[in-house]
Image: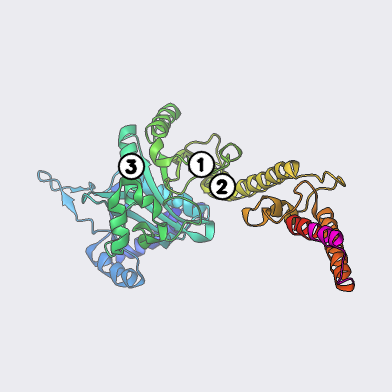
Amino acid sequence: MWKLTRPGNQHDKLTRDNLLDLEDHQLVRIETVRKDQRQVWVLTRRGHDEAKELLEPKGIRVSALREKKYDPVTGKLLGVGYDEHAAAVTSTAAELHRAGIGHRLGFATEIGHRLADGYVQRADLVVRAPQAGVPVLLVEVDRRSEDAHDLVTKLRRYWQWGRLLPKDAAKRTVDLVRSRPDAIEHVGHDKRLWRRVYPPTGREGLAPVAFVFADTTETKVANTVAELEEAGRRYWAPRRYDSLYEKAITARDYRQAVPVVVTTLEQLQEHGAGAAVWRRLGRTGEQTLTDVLDNPDGHTLYRAQEARADAEDKRRRAAEREARRPVCRRCGRKFTDERWEEITAHRTAVRAGDRSVCGPCRADDVAREEAAAEAVRLAAATSPELEPEHAQELGKLRGLFRRRG
C-alpha cells in the first residue's frame, strides 16, 4: 500500500500513520505480518461498507470483504486471507504505478473473463494506463506455483476469449462465425466481446498479456519462458501476410495474436517498470513496455512494403510492355498507345490499314488515298464525256480506292 499510494516516498511513515488513524476509527485492521516484518492491513466490515459507498458509484470495484478467521483450538486470529502471491501482485502494481504506468485507481485484481464453455479465466491484475501508452494490460503473476503448461493454458484461454462475440452480435455475424472455425478472423475487433470490456490497444492484436515471475531463479524463468514460447506459439506468434508480393514482404500480421511480454518482479523493483526490463515472446533482448508492445514489423511496415512492391511491379510491367511496343517499318518511330491498340483491337484492326506502319505514316497513306480519290472525282466531274478506254481506267482506280479504304 505504501508503494502504491506514495511511490515518491522513501519511507512508509506517512502511510503507516494514516493506517493507524483508520484503525482508530475501526475502518482497517492488521490481518497478518509477513516474513519481512511488514504488516498486511485489510478493511473491516465498516471500512468495507464505506469504501463501497465511496468508490462503486465511480465505477471502481471493491474487493470482497476478508472475514476474520480464528484457530478452532487456540482461538487465535489467523491471517489466512492473504498470501505471498497477493503480495507479489500488489508489488507489481506498485512498481508499475511508481514508473507512471497507471493511476492507482486504474488497477483491478481478479478480473474474470468468461469463456464459451462457462470457465472463468481470472487475471491477477488488469492495468489501464492510456496516458502511458498502455490502454490495457492483463497481468499474470507467477511465483513458480504453476508449471509452464498451466501458463500456456492461461494464454490459450485469453486467446479464445479474444475471439468471442458479444451476446447481442448481429445474426449475420454469428452465422458467419459458426460456418467455419477460422471465420472469426474475418470479424473486426470492434465487433468482438473483448472490445466491449477493454478499449482499443492502439496496436494490432488482442489485449496484451504480461507474465511477471517472482521469487524464483533466472534458470527457472528462462526454462519456463522457453516452453511458453514454444508451446504457446499458436496464440502469440504473428503470421505471414497473404500478398501477391510474398518475396518482397517481410512484415508480419499480428491481428489475431495475443501480444505476450515477460519480466520478473525483481527486475521491476531493481530497475523500475519504465526501464528496458520487458521481453516479448518471439523477440530477443529487453525493451521498455511501450516499445515491446509496439509492432515495428507489423501492419505499418506491411503497407510500406506493399506500396513499394506494387510500384516496382508496375515499373516492371511498364518496361516489359515498352519492350514489346511495335516500331514503324517505314519511319522507325515507336507506335503510340492509340495506334498500338488500333492494330490489335478486333473492332478496329480491320480498318487499321497497313499494320506495320505507325499512326503518322498511316495518316499519310490515308491522305494520299483521299487526294487521289478527290482527283479522280474532279476529273470525272470536268470531263463527263470520256473516251471508253478512259472511263474503264477511271473505274479501275475507283475500285482500287474502295478496296484500300
Q: Residues in magenta?
A: 383-396
Seen in the picture, residue 174 relative to 378 is either above or below; the reply is: above
258 or 396, nearer to the observer = 396
How many residues crowd mark 3 within 10 Å: few (<14), some (14–19), many (20+)? some
Secondary structure of residue under mark 2:
helix
Q: Nearer the viewer, mark 2 or mark 3?
A: 3
Question: Could you tell me which quadrant the N terminus lies in?
Answer: bottom left
Seen in the picture, residue 95 relative to 27 is either above or below; the reply is: above
Residue pictured at 75% horizontal, 48% vertical = 355
Is residue 86 among the parts visible in the rendering?
A: no
Q: Separation of disc 3 and disc 1 at Cα?
A: 21 Å
Q: Position of residue 256 (x, y in %)?
A: 42, 47
Seen in the picture, residue 314 relative to 166 is either above or below; the reply is: above
Q: Separation of disc 2 and disc 3 at Cα?
A: 24 Å
Q: Name the side, left or right, on which 232 lies relative to 329.
A: left
Residue pictured at 63% horizontal, 57% vertical = 347
Q: Is 393 included in the stretch rendered in magenta?
A: yes
How many residues crowd mark 1 within 10 Å: few (<14), some (14–19), many (20+)? many
Amino acid type, residue under disc 1 in the picture: Trp
Q: Name the side, left or right, on which 378 lies relative to 267.
A: right
Q: Name the side, left or right, on which 14 lies relative to 247.
A: left
In the rendered image, which residue does mark 2 sit on? 291
Amino acid type, residue under disc 2 in the picture: Asp
In the drawing, what numbered circle is on residue 156? Answer: 3
Asked whether disc 2 touches disc 1, contact meaning CB atoms under 8 Å apart, the reply is: no
100 or 302, nearer to the observer = 302
Question: Mark 3 or mark 2, which is nearer the start of the sequence?
Answer: 3
